[in-house]
Image (cartoon, rainbow, N blue to C red):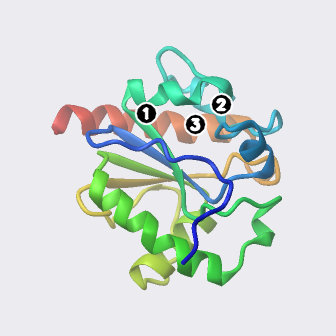
Amino acid sequence: MTHNLETLSDYLATGLDLVFVGLNPGLTSVRDGHYFASPRNRFWKAVNSAGIFDPPLEAETDHLALEQGIGFTDVVKRPSAGASDLRAADFREWAPVLKDKLERYAPKVVCFHGSVAYRNFLKYAEGVDLRPELGGQDRPIGESTVFLVPNPSPANAVYSMNDLMGWYYQLRVLLEETTTER
């Protein structure tokens, strides 16, 4: 397993309330050095409208998320122009690495961006073949609650901006409930 590639650094630490898990870094994000850096990506607008970050952040200030108890990583750390460039070998290599990270850092909530990301994580890290629905999941990762939102990529036009904002709002409600319970 060779991991000497240009990619985005993980923003992970113990004790986080939330970790966002993307499918893999896009080329624009790697070039700019920030998560969801493409101006066409809808993540920052949708997540900020739901009030998850306080104060709101944007791609250029993504490193400040850790100060708010929020981290970022990806199922596959190999960058690509699009999801169609990923192969089973990528998931086979990287999904178990992600599982180890999530179990080690144990955030309260893990939020996967898109069913492709979560489904491939389940298949290659846990040996489970499921077609998950959006929202809260029955399968924790270690002690972490799992939530699935639509992928905010502009390529995922099935979901409108209002749809995305609604899912991030539901995530915020779960996060508030989870952080008061623990």
Which-is-in-front pick, marks 2 and 1? 2
Which amino acid type is marked by label 3? Answer: Gly
For label 1, the SS is helix
As measured in the structure, the alpha-carbon distance from the residue carrying label 2 to the one carrying label 1 is 14 Å
Q: Residue at x 26, y 39 (%)?
A: 15
Left or right, residue 39 beside residue 63 = right
Q: Residue at x 53, y 65 (%)?
A: 118
- Circle 1 is placed at which residue position? 172
For label 3, the SS is helix
As measured in the structure, the alpha-carbon distance from the residue carrying label 2 to the one carrying label 3 is 14 Å
User: In the image, residue 173 lies at what x, y percent?
Assistant: 39, 34
For label 2, the SS is helix
Q: Which mark is residue 166?
A: 3
Instruction: Name the residue at the top extreme.
Output: 55
User: In the image, residue 169 lies at what x, y percent?
Assistant: 50, 33
- Which image quarter is the N terminus in? bottom right
Q: Are marks 2 and 3 in contact (CB under 8 Å)?
A: no
102 or 6: which is nearer to us?
Answer: 6
Residue 127 vs 175, above or below: the answer is below
Residue 29's image quarter? top right
Q: Residue at x 49, y 84 (%)?
A: 129
- Which image quarter is the C terminus in? top left
- Circle 2 is placed at which residue position? 44
Left or right, residue 149 beside residue 87 = left
**From where the camera sits, is residue 52 visible?**
no
User: In the image, residue 47 lies at what x, y percent?
Assistant: 58, 31
> Would you call the spot at circle 1 few (<14 residues within 10 Å), some (14-19), or many (20 or more)?
some
Q: Residue at x 55, y 46 (%)?
A: 9
142 or 92: which is nearer to us?
Answer: 92
Between disc 2 and disc 3, whose residue precedes? 2
User: In the image, residue 165 lies at what x, y percent?
Assistant: 61, 34
